[in-house]
Amino acid sequence: MDTHVLDLIEEKIRNLISRYKILQDKYIQVLKENENLNNKYKDLFYNTENSQETISELQKAVERYKEQNKDLQNTLAQKEERIRKFTEQANEIDSRVGSMLQEIDNIIGESDTQSAGSND
């Protein structure tokens, strides 16, 4: 083979090697980008999973607070009823005491009237 043909073949080989290196660099770049995307996906998946757990925990906490609120409302209603009954009883006792004091005043008044009548 003559040298001209060998030179052409050698140049083609160099071009192929150069193109191969370019493709190899691009392939390495794509692999790095793929790895970055995989890491981002893992982070996103992890964050989503944590968010779901957090949402679930918050929902459970809301349910617990709703139950506690119901219990507190029931307790408040019971206490209000007890206060109402106690107030009724206190009013009844006050009324009785008032009647008794009136009777005592009447008895004292009668006794004073009788004493004054016998002193005359």
Image (cartoon, rainbow, N blue to C red):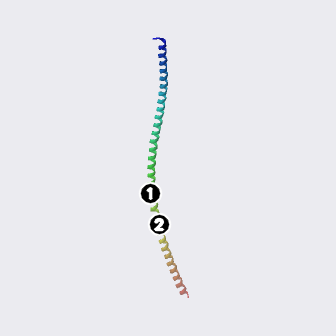
User: Residue at position x 48%, y 36% from top?
Assistant: 40
Q: Nearer the viewer, mark 2 or mark 1?
A: 1
Give x and y (percent) for residue 56. Answer: 44, 47
Amino acid at pointer 1:
Lys
Give x and y (percent) for residue 106. Answer: 51, 80
Pick whichever of labels 2 and 1 is earlier in the sequence.
1
Residue 3 or residue 63, whichever sits in front = 3
Classed neighbour count for the residue bearing mark 2: other residues with Cα under 10 Å, few (<14), some (14–19), many (≥20): few
Residue 14 or residue 74, whichever sits in front = 14
Furthest toward the bottom, the residue is 120
Question: In the rendered view, would you say 52 is above or below 35?
Answer: below
Question: In the rendered view, would you say 89 is above or below 43?
Answer: below
What kind of element bears circle 2?
helix
Quarter of the image where the C terminus is located: bottom right
User: Residue at position x 46%, y 60% from top?
Assistant: 76
User: Residue at position x 47%, y 41% from top?
Assistant: 47
Question: In the rendered view, would you say 96 is above or below 78?
Answer: below
Residue for badge 1:
70
- Labelled pair 2, 1 in contact (Cβ < 8 Å): no
Give x and y (percent) for residue 43. Answer: 47, 38
Residue for badge 2:
84
User: Residue at position x 44%, y 44% from top?
Assistant: 52
Residue 115 or residue 37, whichever sits in front = 37
Furthest toward the top, the residue is 2
Q: CA distance from mark 2 to mark 1?
A: 21 Å
Give x and y (percent) for residue 109. Answer: 53, 81
Amino acid at pointer 2:
Arg
